[in-house]
Image (cartoon, coloured by chain):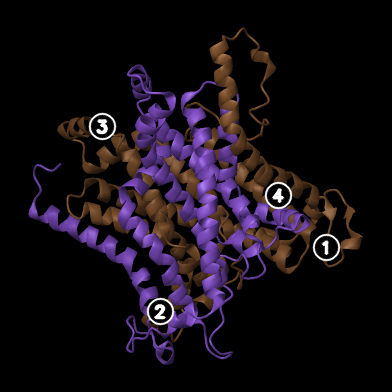
Chain colours: A purple, B brown
Amino acid sequence: MAVATTARQKSGWITANLVTILLVLIPVVWIFSLSFKDPSTITDPTFFPKKWTWANYSGIFNSSDFTRPLLNSIGIGLIATFISVVLASLAAYAVARLAFPGKRALIGLSLLIAMFPLISLATPLFNIERALGIFNSWIGLIFPYIAFGLPLGIYTLSAFFREIPWELEKAAKMDGATPFQAFVKVIAPLAAPGMVTTAILVFLFCWNEFLLAFTLTSTIAARTAPAALAFFTGSSQFAVPTGSISAAAVVITIPIIIFVLLFQRRIVAGLTSGAVKG
Amino acid sequence: MTAETRAVITGEPGVAEPKHRKRLTEGARAERRLGWMLCAPAVIVMIAVAAFPIIYAIWLSLQRYDLRFPAQAKFIGFGNYGAVLSSPYWWHALVVTLIITIVSVAIEFVLGMLLALLMFRTLFFRGTVRTIILIPYGIVTVAAAYGWQYAWTPDTGYLSALFNNSAPLTKTGASIAIIILAEVWKTTPFMALLLMAGLSLVPEDLLKAARVDGASAWQRFYGVMLPLMKPAILVALLFRTLDAFRIFDNIYVLTQGGNGTYSVSILGYDNLFRGLNLGIGSAISILIFVCVAIIAFIFIRLFGAAAPGTEG
């Protein structure tokens, strides 16, 4: 394939790549550019702002209508991710390394949950959480996020754990390491990349989730950023919240772009690990 | 590969199936116990937050239960299902959902395959393309949806301006097309990555051999690559179909389900949280769940899609 690349093929590949990059980036750049448009020019449909301003950003950061949900998103996302990855690691270790009856049922259950239509859960959870008094609280969102993070975590991690050369653990023990040392010095460094990948994927899920965040909260006490966007109003009753919503959309997109730039390889590996094995 | 998914929850793995009561060595028994102990926390959370609520939803769906009149709650059997299934709204939502699902998954499959080939074969900017396409995958759906909404709003959007300041989000057909556009833009990268993983399973030698035998590029793709990629393709299609079927975020932001663009999830939401009718809403939820189960069944049994990770 690489042997005879003619000039025509070369330019063909380059064009295809550029078209792809443009198609991906234009909508993203559009939101950025909207967020910098001066409120007086927001109804001017040019792609780039004629008059640049930070007003939309200072506006949203001066109001707890956005800062509180942003904090909720970060807190709920981190806690749910941490707990799911810990629980999923335990289960994935068992799935990858141990023989026990019920393994199939476990995988069936996680597959079932991964495919769950979230709206089917919104109703009963809405009722259950009101009865338990955890409606509109962090816990009320953390629990469902853990439950939905787990299947993703169990798949990804069991695929990663299968690749680890576990004989090394035995070798370390034979060389006189205690089981704890063998785990910390040998196994943990090998398992860490898979766990980081899984954590990123689970966090992205929590960060992105809208339906439950929207239905299981009623105030900004627990509402996460994506749900808060839908409640934005303009700075005055007559202003359209276009600028604020765009600025908020940019703010919640930035962490994604940073993750992607830092962990591109790991994210790709994590997304594809489950699929190839099937 | 041959593993089938159990659609029925057989209970916590901690409850052993007694038929295996052969003589086990001490080590094997300890291994079992450890396996169950390690899985127990995950299983308990999944059952408590997902399996139990769905059973509760079934029970709710058999009640007449309107939050505005809680005193009149009463068991009415399948009355809610009758009401939903005889309502034109349900069938309209189902048709809209199926159109969006089928059209967007089909487009995503074609574009995703092209993108996968591009990322796999190209010698230029390979890293850049692989990085860039993760942005739509990672971006918050709601954030991207607002971008699309504003782009198509007259007097604000560049796309609307491009089409003579038109307002496509006020028309049913055009709105559905934009919903599909937003869906395709967001999820084609995911499809492409799964397909790329499938492409890496195709041995290079086989393609070379086919080339030597005079197979055209299309024949090599259709006759060699596609059959070898079948498992990866089915997994990608299964995931995306189920995901597209429960579409909510994009529609909610773009049209709020107006102009007859509501999907089944939007209909369920409206009945539950706007109409506050838990009985009808739960019946819709359960029907959506049944649809998803049917789709999964079709993929797994008829097409032979393997549930990923089941070979363990």
Q: Residue B66 shows which numbered tag? A: 1
* Residues flagged by tags 2 and 1 on a common chain: no
Q: Which residue bears the numbered disc 2?
A: A35
Q: Nearer the viewer, residue B215 or B5?
A: B5
Question: Is residue A256 placed above or below A29 in the rendered structure?
Answer: above
**Under tag 2, what secondary structure?**
helix
- Residue at mark 2 to residue at mark 1: CA–CA distance: 42 Å
**Under tag 1, what secondary structure?**
loop
Nearer to us of marks 2 and 4 is 2
**Under tag 4, what secondary structure?**
helix
In this orientation, does residue B171 appear?
no
Q: Which residue bears the numbered disc 3?
A: B203
> What kind of residue is marked 1?
Asp
Please give left or right for residue B238 compared with residue B266 in the image: left
Q: Residue B286 shows which numbered tag? A: 4
Q: Residue at x 20, y 30 (%)?
A: B205
In this orientation, does residue A121 appear?
yes
The disc numbered 2 marks a residue on which chain?
A: A
Q: Residue at x 39, y 66 (%)?
A: A254
Question: Quadrant where the N terminus of chain A lies?
Answer: top left
Question: Is residue B189 placed above or below A277 in the rendered structure?
Answer: below
> What kind of residue is marked 4?
Ile
